[in-house]
Image: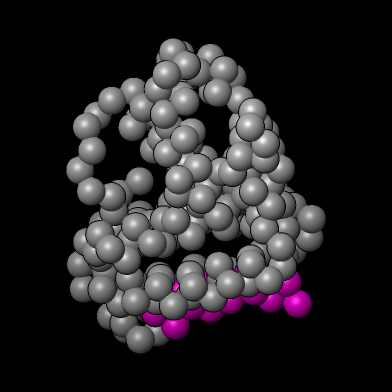
Amino acid sequence: MEGEGFSPDTAATRLHRELRSRLCEGDFAPGDVISIRRIASEYGTSAMPAREAVRWLVTEGALVFSDSRKIMVPELNRERFHEVLFARKSLETEVSRQAFPRLTAEDLAALEGIDAWINTAIEAGDMQAYMRGNHRFHFLIYRRSHSRVLLSLVEILWLQYGPSMRQIGSRWGASSIADDHHLEVTQALSRGDRGGFCDAIAADIEQGMRLLE
């Protein structure tokens, strides 16, 4: 994921980026136990870079120590999840405003392609594919902001949001996400409407809030 400062390209940093994306995309669920040995085996590394990547995620709040030996994906209660979504709406609307003038025709075409993939995932009731597509859709936009400060904060929020949203969406089924606002986002971008574009981003995030009502 972008938005971070420069870091050396090591096994630990590559693994950290990969695990970050997987958390944002809901590949892990709240309460999952994270095994350093299993991660090292899955990615073909030694235990040292796996341990470093996992500890990095702990410092970011994406993972927690449940006791001296166990590392887990944290549970978010209703109030905390609502706070995360509220913070996302505030920050991501501003990041989208900054990104808008930098988005190109090629970006629009890419967003439309991702949205088509997302719609297929919704029709199939495939939450994993939906989460992956949703993450890619939003961050294609946000990375165009070139805002290291705000983008880093947004990434931290998604690390907390992803696992819980996957769990909530899976509980409610595909119908809970069928009214995403991605089409409104791409339509506003195509007509050069920055206000409508930012409003559609905010409405898309508010959808998650409605699932809690």
3 left or right of 154 in image: left
Residue 10 x, y percent position in the rendering: 28, 25
Front in this rendered view, residue 113 or 175 = 175
| Span of residues in magenta | 198-213
Residue 154 higher or lower than 9, as above or below: below
Name the magenta segment's main secondary structure. Answer: helix
Residue 191 x, y percent position in the rendering: 31, 80
Extreme residue toward the front, this view: 68
**Residue at the (29%, 53%) spot, across then down:** 3
Residue 36 x, y percent position in the rendering: 55, 23
Query: Which colouring convention does the figure follow?
Result: one colour
State yes or no: residue 212 in magenta.
yes
Image quarter (top left, top right, bottom left or bottom right) of the C terminus: bottom right
State yes or no: residue 94 in magenta.
no
**Residue at the (23%, 48%) spot, across then down:** 5
**Residue at the (34%, 23%) spot, across then down:** 11
**Residue at the (63%, 66%) spot, across then down:** 81
Residue 23 higher or lower than 202, as above or below: above
Residue 143 x, y percent position in the rendering: 29, 58
55 left or right of 139 in image: right
Q: How many marks?
A: 0
Front in this rendered view, residue 100 or 27 = 27
16 left or right of 194 in image: right
Q: Is residue 180 visible?
A: yes
Q: Is residue 187 visible?
A: no
Front in this rendered view, residue 120 or 7 = 7
Residue 3 higher or lower than 71, as above or below: below
